[in-house]
Image (cartoon, helix red, strand yellow):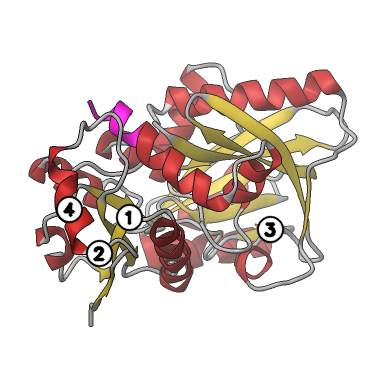
Amino acid sequence: MNTTTTHESPVGSAKRNSTRSMSPHKPTTLDITVLAGGPGMEREVSLNSGQAVRDALVRLGHYVELCDIGPQNVSALDRPADFVFIALHGEFGEDGTVQAELERRKIPYCGSNATASRLAMDKVQAKRRLEDRGIPTPKYVVADRHNVGKIASLFEPIAVVKPVLSGSSVDTTIARTSTALQASARAVVGKYGAALVEKYVSGRELTVGILGDVALPICEIRTRREFYDYQAKYIDDDTQYLFDIDLPADLQRRVQEMSLGAHRALGCEVFSRADVMVDAKTLEPYLLEINTIPGFTSHSLLPKAAARVGIGFDGLCQRIIELSFAAKR
């Protein structure tokens, strides 16, 4: 069941009512709805992100309501608000659904528009766009009910198998044998209808946050697990996030440039996070995907990267609001 929690800023409702006459390009104190929860596997992460964003916005002096929203109940969008901060991950919140409804209602919101959100969420369509723009991404095939029975013969192990429309590495596996590849592909196709089977790149896992039209410092992820899966992302306390990395300066520039290029190629706006693998043997970088609403939890990487350039968590939230108003003008 969806719930709505109201949190008023220290200045109270008088200041809340004053926001209506503000210029949309210079937001100061706003009435903000923060959307969190959603229906998918990333629900708990989203609730944590939403709480963190809500707390930051209250500290900034905004009037805030944190709303648990889902496809069966969008009543949170009915309340008058100057701005909606989307802290939803994956299905419903990151795939353009909420964005399209907000656009229909003409309510300003954070981040990428509905079209870009849909494109980035669809891993296959996104990879095709990246290929069209000359941005390297690992070789892949799409498994579905028609070809899943012979997928092992169509694609060599070792491979990564993941849902086409999902995030946070949910139901993602690394298949190291033909038997494992066949089984993983069948499982994902059975659950989601299709699977992305992608060439495994053995090497260093990097992520690049984008804020505005700037690539933030590169972060290298190191985990004791086989890869940076859901557990490593949100639960493990020993996952390492390293910003002082020993990669050649020209390679680091290339990774940042291709990350920003992917953000632009998919039509993303305001903020995103690019996931990149660097082949251990060739040092060639490969763009895996763009996340249009990365996490805002204590483990999340966009806030960590912003902090490296002097933008704290509260400042990041405020910057996102300001950039979003400018993008939606």
Q: Is residue 327 magenta?
A: yes
| Position in image of residue 127 (x %, y %) | 49, 33
Q: CA distance from mark 4 to mark 3?
A: 37 Å
Chain-order first, disc 4 or disc 3: 4
Gap between marks 1 and 4, in whole Å? 11 Å
Q: Looking at the image, is 189 positioned above or below residue 146?
A: below
Q: Which residue is mark 4?
A: 81
Comparing 329 with 129, the one in front is 329
Q: Give the x, y percent position of residue 115.
A: 27, 35
Mark nearer the N terminus (1 vs 4): 1
Q: Is residue 210 visible?
A: yes
The residue that appears at 60% across and 56% down in the rendered structure is 300
Tell which of 135 and 101 is nearer to you.
101
Residue position marked by numbered label 2 in the rendering? 12
218 within the magenta span: no
Q: First in sequence: mark 2 or mark 3?
A: 2
Q: Are marks 1 and 2 in contact (CB under 8 Å)?
A: no
Q: Look at 27% across and 44% down and name the residue there.
A: 109
Q: What amino acid type should be assigned to the residue bearing mark 1?
A: His
Q: Which residue does the numbered mark 1 point to in the structure image?
A: 62
Badge 2 amino acid: Gly
Range covered by the magenta-colored residues: 324-329
Give the number of the mark in front: 2 or 4: 2
Q: Residues within 10 Å of mark 4 (few under 14, many from 20)?
A: many
Q: Along the horizontal axis of the image, is 109 left or right of 123?
A: left
Main SS type for the magenta part? helix
